[in-house]
Amino acid sequence: MILVIAAELENLSVIRHFIREAATALRLSPAAIDDVELAVDELATNIICHGYNGQPGDIEVEVKANGEAVEIYLRDQAPLFDPTLRPEPDLTAPLEERPIGGLGVHLARQLTDTLTYRPSAKGGNELLLTKKIDSSSPLTEEIPHGNHN
Amino acid sequence: MEITTEQIQTPSVTILRLNGDLDGSNFREVMKKAKELYEAGSRHLLIDMSQVPFMSSAGLVALHNTALLYGGKEQLDVENGWGALKATASAGEAGMQGQVKLLNPTARVVKALDQTGMLSFFSVYEDRAAALASF
């Protein structure tokens, strides 16, 4: 299943809907579907905001099964950039000392089994996310209660 | 996303109610509305997230920024976005600091906050009356 769509923030909801439909068809669990929906949204947002940086372009999203995993490819023609090289953020810093933003790739890593990058054969970028069909992120079934009152 | 507000007089609390997915397409609207409320004198903000089925890290940016705003700290310039930081006019002065709390965030919102280490920065309430009484 392939979706090609303009790299615009208004299309994020269309991409999420496509991911949910495709992942459901490939028998990912509801929790795992939630995970890949957010992971793809984060990476697509990065492509739109930082890759194309306001310039027009397309994002190609391909979802397919590979054995016991679902593979999701995100391809674009933006300048070459490998988001997997981004260092992990410091999640222990106080709120006022943290940089605002920069958490999208961290979430994408957390929510998928693998996240890999390579320059695409067409000259742009290609990200591959995989999610095992029976897996979900560790916190999916046990929602934390943190500072609840 | 639909954004509505409700002003409670006693105690003085502004409820910011979000309805819809919170993502990169609309997080600036939330930041802008919070800034308008703060500049109009609001110091106690309760964000009702019971109708937010999906939130990306862009939503985390909006919450982080709003917490800094109400805390009188530096925040993102809403108009210029990611790169630009500017301080609030009277950052840190007595009487300028306020509080931001969350009401009934959905499980996915709580999970995103938790996975980024941000959950502990917000008091989270499941009961509106208890939330209002906490300010």
Image (cartoon, coloured by chain):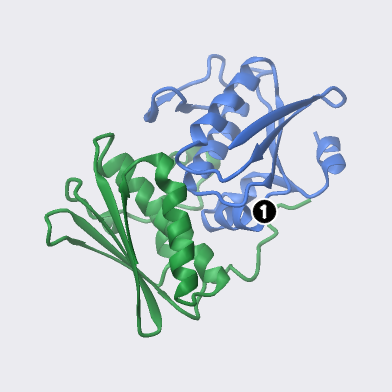
In this picture, residue B25 sits left or right of residue A119: right
Q: Residue at x 55, y 49 (%)?
A: B55
- Residue B52: image location, x then y, percent: 63, 47
- Residue B9: image location, x then y, percent: 85, 22
> From the viewer's perspective, is residue A35 above or below residue A125?
below
> From the viewer's perspective, is residue B76 above or below residue A120?
above
Which image quadrant for residue B77? top left
In this picture, residue B14 sits left or right of residue B80: right
Quadrant in which the N terminus of chain A is drawn: bottom left
Q: Residue at x 70, y 24 (%)?
A: B43
Q: Residue at x 57, y 70 (%)?
A: A30
Secondary structure under tag 1 reads: loop
- Residue A91: image location, x then y, percent: 49, 53
Using the rendered image of the protein, determine whether residue A137 is visible from the camera's viewpoint. Answer: no
Image mark 1: chain: B
What residue is pinned by disc 1? B106
> From the viewer's perspective, is residue A7 above or below residue B16?
below
Q: Which chain is blue?
A: B
Per the rendering, the colour in which chain A appears is green
Q: Residue at x 54, y 41 (%)?
A: A95
Using the rendered image of the protein, determine whether residue A13 is visible from the camera's viewpoint. Answer: yes
Please state which of residues B122 and B90 is positioned toward the viewer in this rendering: B122
